[in-house]
Amino acid sequence: AAYALIAYQTAYLKANHPIEFLAASMTLDIGNTDKLNGFAQEARRMGIRIEPPSVNHSEAGFMPSETRIRYSLAALRNVGRQAVDHICAEREKRGRFKDVSAFARAINPRLVNKRALETLASAGAFDELGIDRATALDNVDRIMAAGSRSLEDETGGQNDLFASAARTPPPIELRPAKPWAPTDRLSHEFEAVGFFLTGHPLDDYQEVLEALGAETWVDFAAKARTRRVVGTLAGTVLSMRERQGKSGNAYAFVAFSDPTGQFEAVVFSEALAGSRELLKPGSAVLLDVEAEADGETVKV
């Protein structure tokens, strides 16, 4: 009865306050990428937009608004809570960052290190500062150098000289970089977030996949939980781990992603021999599969 009451209250909150409910659920599971991906898929199904992370708008938790949820900075890989708290505190003190130079002068590189900045760049957290992701990532060293100079000036009292002269330091001279292709942009985003947040490499193939009869992972998995099934799936290769069986035949565990989720499939020796060159990370492939339920998971 106690569990039923909690289930009723939870269902009520999701039905009547879906944006707040999903934002709170994502904050609760902030360290679980698989669950965050599931919540993001559920948000899309309900017509709720997940806004990408932003150094000007994101907080440590997932923030709800009237029609959308802003992705958390603390949920990104290699960006610790200390770094996020520092960025938010500086933004609160100085106001929103006007450009990447203002951001660089505000941060302490001892608190926001190189890996954190690389992740922020790859995830699109600087997009609103008028700098593309490739340029931001290629200039992480200059952003850190500007932060170090600003920290040294502040420690030495040099900021008072700038204030008295009514001028600000010159902007950072950014090293030009070739903008990423859409697939490269999504690949970097995946590395930073843990899943494809603002799009998917298979999005451009949807009409073709429907014509070929390819199912989405979420629909296929739902059927597989009730009976043994065969079907056709499409997936972007995320990783491959090759193994050797007792008989000496090679097989592999391959992780895939489609717009509805991620799954892993076992590729046996004959199929592996004929498709090994296709199973490289980033490749888009069609799969003929069979699957069945194994407890809570689906074995493909």
Image (tube, rainbow, N blue to C red):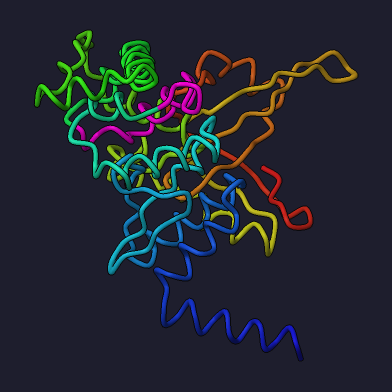
Residue 184: percent from the left, percent from the top? 34, 22
Residue drawn at (30%, 48%), measured in percent from left and top? 57
Residue 162: percent from the left, percent from the top? 17, 21
Q: In the rendered structure, does residue 67 fall within the stretch colored magenta? A: no
> Between 2 and 38, which is closer to the camera in this rendering?
2
Quadrant housing residue 41: bottom left
Seen in the picture, residue 242 relative to 203 is either above or below; the reply is: above
Residue drawn at (9%, 26%), measured in percent from left and top? 166
Q: Which residues are magenta?
A: 108-129
Report whether 236 appears left or right of 276.
left
Residue drawn at (69%, 50%), measured in percent from left and top? 298
Residue 115: percent from the left, percent from the top? 49, 21
Seen in the picture, residue 3 relative to 127 is either above or below; the reply is: below
Report whether 62 appears left or right of 176.
right
> Between 200 and 147, which is closer to the camera in this rendering?
147
> Between 53 and 169, which is closer to the camera in this rendering?
169
Report whether 160 appears left or right of 294.
left
Residue 269: percent from the left, percent from the top? 71, 20
Seen in the picture, residue 2 relative to 254 is either above or below; the reply is: below
